[in-house]
Amino acid sequence: MFNLHLKRFYYGAGRISSGLFIFLLMVTASYVQAKESIERIEPPHWWVDFEQPKLQLLIYGEDIANHNVSLAYPGVTLKSVEKVENPNYIFVNLEVAKNTKAGEMQLTFNHIANHNNFTYSYELQERKPNSAQRKGFDSSDAMYLITPDRFANGDVNNDTLANMYEGLNRTDKEGRHGGDIAGITQHLDYIKELGFTAIWSTPLLENNMPITSYHGYAITDFYKIDPRFGSNEDYKNLSHKAKKLGMGLIMDMVVNHIGSKHWWMKGLPEVDWLNYPNKYVQSNHRRIALHDPYVAEQDKNAFTDGWFWKTMPDLNQRNSLLATYLIQNSIWWIEYADLAGVRMDTYSYPDKDFMATWSKSIMNEYPQFNIVGERYINDRAMVAYYQRGKVNADGYISHLPSVMDFPLQDAMVKGLTEAESWDTGLIRMYKALGHDWQYADPNNLVIFSDNHDMQRIFTQLNEDIDLMKMAMGYTFTMRGIPQLFYGTEILKNSPGAKDDGIIRSDFPGGWQRDSINGFTGIGLSRAQKTMQGFIKTLLNWRKTSTVIHNGKLMHFLPEQGIYAYFRYNSSTKVMVIFNKNNEVKEVPLDGFSQMIKKNSSWKNVITKDVITLDDKVKLLPRTVLILEKN
């Protein structure tokens, strides 16, 4: 197009010689060729008025290191240009002063040898009003966890794309089934009506991997939503629509590893961008290595530096350029998609000093935000180690606000399924809470009945409806921030040995020809509808029950298959009491006199019946009773 305009000028004006015209064409060709040599600038744009004024641009293009870079923009200073081992990368370090105005910033590139110049327009945007003060998820919220590929197919046009390795194969439990962002967006009303206030989806970033790409944990582009899920704009739109319905969006992030088909793998910026860049070395997955006072250095390094899996190269966050890249990427998505939280995958696997810096950097920008880290282990001390405010013996200071409470989930399942004895059964649930002294902030732990990495809770509870109701009652009245895995509300199971493809099976009704529809109730069994209704009633009550959000907790030692605890504050109380026995039990209330006054009026949260508690409370067999002080 530029050449066309130049020809029109030449023939129309008739003032320049043919030699000069040829020279201008050559300059134009050099300009176009040079500009096309920039394949990526990341972050693709930025914002003004962050607390941290520093901004690092990763610039990628053929022989881009053979250019000098300059700019002139009010409030922005070019501090340095770092050239690395690979000449196709440079890192431009800028400083964006406070009160810098948004606009288009021109970066000028001058070739060292032939002096061909070109410019690149980089946008600095205004932040949303009060963006820094956004409120993250907290104990007033309830999260709905979704595996997008298996939830609902809202747009069949993106099922198979020519430039992506994997296309649609719904017959393969490990293949892509077609669920997408459109499917989630179309069912936001369903999620809201269930009573959820936050949505956590497993990763949606590009996973252009040859096999098993549906789960999202082998990222191949940190700044691009996988087109089989939708676009960046679709993701931002999902967040916007969810927010209008009173639900926040939580992004699942991964900084420990990438997918083996990530575009970096065509040529790393530096050799130490990865741990073991030239060969596959498996992590030993021995989480204790981080805390063992007698650990051999090689065993500790094997945990953090080994690859999570053979298709997931391990990132070396000790590389300062990579560390900055990962921190900025997280902030970019929070700002771009207006996120209400982050769930960080495999939190303990990356360099732990980097993770402290990463979480601190985010919380400095968003002081009321929340981040939950995955620490998949049933050892409370090892989970508590990473929560902000914990005083650790080794002096490690974490800035992570929340951690996944795997120990509580394990105690709940064992407590409900084991036979009652001195040290088994309900005493497990009691003792789990008795260890809360190890946590800096128990009320900011994310609690859950199951998730995408373990057997479905209905299967863990031997497909026992009564135990399922107890588990839901426990999860949604306990201290902390509850999370439910999609389909739990309709009793999804995972029979047989643990199999991720089965655990993450399709939600019925998410595909056009499904004969059963969990969203509308068509084809669901009576038991499924009952469980769905039970959870809906419980969660919608919880949504406005501030005593469950932040009230104190007192529990009483289990006896003979009966376990009770209370949530209370200065204005009200909630009693939660379990009867694991196969017969009706009338439990004397004198043992709970600290919490219950005689002849007090209470309302059944599920049935709405009002009862008066005098000397005893009647418990039906194998039930959980939830009563709110009337």
Image (cartoon, rainbow, N blue to C red):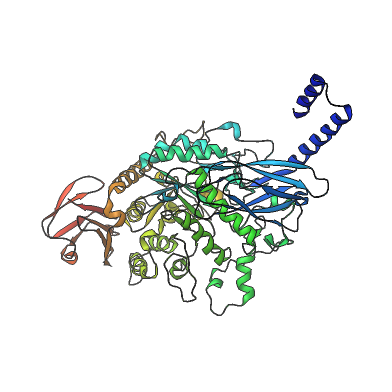
Q: Is residue 118 left or right of residue 191?
A: right
In which quadrant of the rendered view does residue 414 lie?
bottom left
* Residue sticking out furthest to the top: 12
From this view, report whether residue 25 is shown above or below residue 150.
Answer: above
Residue found 62% across the figure and 60% down from its top: 308
Percent coordinates x, y for residue 580 in the rendering:
30, 59
Left or right: 4 with respect to 572?
right
- Residue 430 place in picture, x, y as percent: 32, 66
Q: Nearer the viewer, residue 601 or 517?
A: 601
Number of marks in the rendered image:
0
Q: Position of residue 558 (x, y in %)?
A: 28, 66
Q: Residue at the location (69% across, 36% down)? A: 162
Q: Is any atom of residue 134 visible in this view?
A: yes
- Indicate the quadrant containing the N terminus: top left, top right, bottom left or bottom right: top right
- The answer to which quarter of the image holds residue 433 is bottom left
Residue drawn 81% across and 23% down? 10
